[in-house]
């Protein structure tokens, strides 16, 4: 498996597990029955859990753009050191983004998001200049 597909896989694994901590918080504040139902007045999540939930949504939204870019690189056979580096940077900054969002570190959150965005633009550049 290429480095790009490996980092895509790591990113997917990160994204599919980001929900676990905030659901555990939901269970701890409202109980299991309320967590699996639709209570009229649900207990509020902790601040960190709300932020992690938002980080999870952001990760899903960005995965929708990142995954096809990696697939285009693979199908086109244009994998390179540059595309691998962009994928690695994307994955690492998504971890930093989730943690900094959860722990309310605003500058780091914004910077990590911006770097992940530019990593995707780097992949776009590699795709567009390969043809």
Image: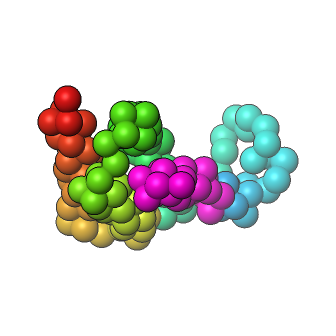
Q: Which quadrant holds the C terminus?
A: top left
Left or right: 35 in relation to 113: right
Please tell me whether residue 94 belongs to the stretch shown in magenta.
no
In percent of the image, x 21 and y 42: which residue is there?
Answer: 126
**In x, y percent, where is residue 94?**
38, 59
Residue at 44% in and 47% down: 59
Residue 38 vs residue 51: left or right? Answer: right
Q: How many marks?
A: 0
Q: Please determine whether, in this image, residue 116 is positioned above or below residue 89.
A: above
Q: Is residue 85 above or below residue 33?
A: below
Q: Is residue 22 above or below residue 105?
A: above
Q: Position of residue 63 (x, y in %)?
A: 44, 42
- Residue 74's quadrant in the figure? top left
**Colour theme:** rainbow
The residue range painted magenta reads: 1-22
The answer to whether residue 17 is magenta is yes
In terms of depth relative to the viewer, which is nearer, 36 or 116? 116
- Residue 113 at x, y percent in the picture: 27, 54
User: Is residue 101 visible in this depiction of the protein?
Assistant: no
Q: Residue furthest top?
A: 131
At horizontal 48% and vertical 64% (from top left) the residue drawn is 48
Q: Position of residue 61 (x, y in %)?
A: 42, 38
Q: Is residue 129 visible?
A: yes
* Closer to us: 42 or 131: 131
Prevailing secondary structure class for the magenta stretch in the rendered image: helix
Of residues 83 and 62, the one nearer the viewer is: 83
The structure residue drawn at horizontal position 74% and vertical position 35%, both measured from the top left corner, is 38
The answer to whether residue 118 is left or right of residue 39 is: left
């Amino acid at each position: 498996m290429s480095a790009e597909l490996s980092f895509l896989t790591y990113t997917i694994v990160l994204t599919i597990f980001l929900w676990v901590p905030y659901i555990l918080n939901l269970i701890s504040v409202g109980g299991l029955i309320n967590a699996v139902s639709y209570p009229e007045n649900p207990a509020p999540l902790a601040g960190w859990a709300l932020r992690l939930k938002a980080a999870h949504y952001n990760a899903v939204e960005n995965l929708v753009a990142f995954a096809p870019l990696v697939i285009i690189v693979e199908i086109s056979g244009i994998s390179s050191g540059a595309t691998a580096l962009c994928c690695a940077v994307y994955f690492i900054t998504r971890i930093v983004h989730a943690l900094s969002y959860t722990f309310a570190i605003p500058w780091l959150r914004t910077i990590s998001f911006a770097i992940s965005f530019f990593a995707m633009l780097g992949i776009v550049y590699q795709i567009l200049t390969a043809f």
